[in-house]
């Protein structure tokens, strides 16, 4: 009975999301309003701290002297401000929706309090149209087109890859603007995004066959691409030394109860349905 209830609840949530995003497009990438400066600052700091940790362990250092590309920054560009503060040479963000345009400069002034060269950084963020700080919006998410002549040594993303319509194409495009030896650090949220279901049935989105799941499309709907598929896509574009690190994992009791009720495509062992979020690391092969 519980599994049937969760199945029905997921369909109900999909209807609500379909109706909401059909009217308002994609506007809420986080569970809080981006205008909440304290929460947005904490969120950006947590993301950059995690990237810093993984990049340092993988590549020896994170940002110093690097040219950084972020895919799908979401509601603010706080991550970019912090990355420049920590020593990056340049930062560019590419998104499909102009979500960060709404944030007042006061947010960045507060975020950079006490930082050397604060005024220089704030001026670059305010302009945001050329190095060292660039924000580009392309509704078709053509990363290579948005990047122009810029090339990057660090490519990062957090909780955006699961929303891309064509992940393989996105990886191909980001690969074109990655320098030989560039390092990617990609955090992916594989679980259900609807708030109540996320806590009670995190793999709910995987219960449905493709025909049913995609019968209610909306911008940013999770694409259900699994870790093994992502790793193959990176390999196909010439990335090497690929690592996958689970970050959030479902309880064994939940997996035992729910996995048998997932759509057939997600019952294969390689899909690693216990993984709810994780980080993919890789290095662009020398050409």
Image (cartoon, rainbow, N blue to C red):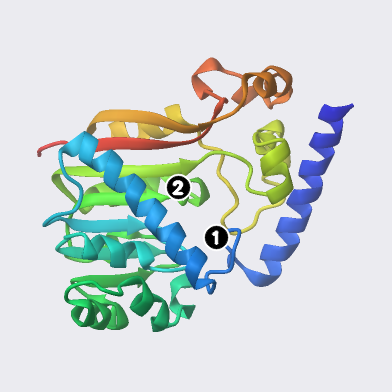
Query: Which circle, 1 or 2, is nearer the viewer?
Result: 1
Horizontal and vertical percent position of residue 155: 27, 50
- Tell me where residue 264 sits by quadrant: top right
Disc 2 element:
helix
Residue found at x 71% / y 32%: 207
The quarter of the rendered structure image containing the C terminus is top left
Residue found at x 43% / y 65%: 41
Q: Residue furthest right?
A: 1
Q: Nearer the viewer, residue 137 or 91?
A: 91
Q: Is residue 88 left or right of residue 43?
A: left
Q: Which residue position holds label 1?
A: 29
Horizontal and vertical percent position of residue 59: 17, 38
Measure the alpha-carbon separation of dots 1 and 2.
12 Å
Camera sees residue 165: yes
- Tell me where residue 261 sits by quadrant: top right
* Vertical comparison of 197 with 69: above or below: above
**Callout 1: few (<14), some (14-19), or many (20+) C-alpha neighbours within 10 Å?**
some
**Callout 2: few (<14), some (14-19), or many (20+) C-alpha neighbours within 10 Å?**
many
Horizontal and vertical percent position of residue 241: 23, 28
Horizontal and vertical percent position of residue 97: 48, 68
Q: Which mark is residue 161?
A: 2
Disc 1 element:
loop
Q: Residue furthest front?
A: 114
Residue found at x 30% / y 72%: 112
Camera sees residue 96: no
* Vertical comparison of 25 with 68: above or below: below
Earlier residue among tags 1 and 2:
1
Q: Is residue 166 left or right of residue 199?
A: left
- Tell me where residue 69 sits by quadrant: bottom left
């Amino acid at each position: 009975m519980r599994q049937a209830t969760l199945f029905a609840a997921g369909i109900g949530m999909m209807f609500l999301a379909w109706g909401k995003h059909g009217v308002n497009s994609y506007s809420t990438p986080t569970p809080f309003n981006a205008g909440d400066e304290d929460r947005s600052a904490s969120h950006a700091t947590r993301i950059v701290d995690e990237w810093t940790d993984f990049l340092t362990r993988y590549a020896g250092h994170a940002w110093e002297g690097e040219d950084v590309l972020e895919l799908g920054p979401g509601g603010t560009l706080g991550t970019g401000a912090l990355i420049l503060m920590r020593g990056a040479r340049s930062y560019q963000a590419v998104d499909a929706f102009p979500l960060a345009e709404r944030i007042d400069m006061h947010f960045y002034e507060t975020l950079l309090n006490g930082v050397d060269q604060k005024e220089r950084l704030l001026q670059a963020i305010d302009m945001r149209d050329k190095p060292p700080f660039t924000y580009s919006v392309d509704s078709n998410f053509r990363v290579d087109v948005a990047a122009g002549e810029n090339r990057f040594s660090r490519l990062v993303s957090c909780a955006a890859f699961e929303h891309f319509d064509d992940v393989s194409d996105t990886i191909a495009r980001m690969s074109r603007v990655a320098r030989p030896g560039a390092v990617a650090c990609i955090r992916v949220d594989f679980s259900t995004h609807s708030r109540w279901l996320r806590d009670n049935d995190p793999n709910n989105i995987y219960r449905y066959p493709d025909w049913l799941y995609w019968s209610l499309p909306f911008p940013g709907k999770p694409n259900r691409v699994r870790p093994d598929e992502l790793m193959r896509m990176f390999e196909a574009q010439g990335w090497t030394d690929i690592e996958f690190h689970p970050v959030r994992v479902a309880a064994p009791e939940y997996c035992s109860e729910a996995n048998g009720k997932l759509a057939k495509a997600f019952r294969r062992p390689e899909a690693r349905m216990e993984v709810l979020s994780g980080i993919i690391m890789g290095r662009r092969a020398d050409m």
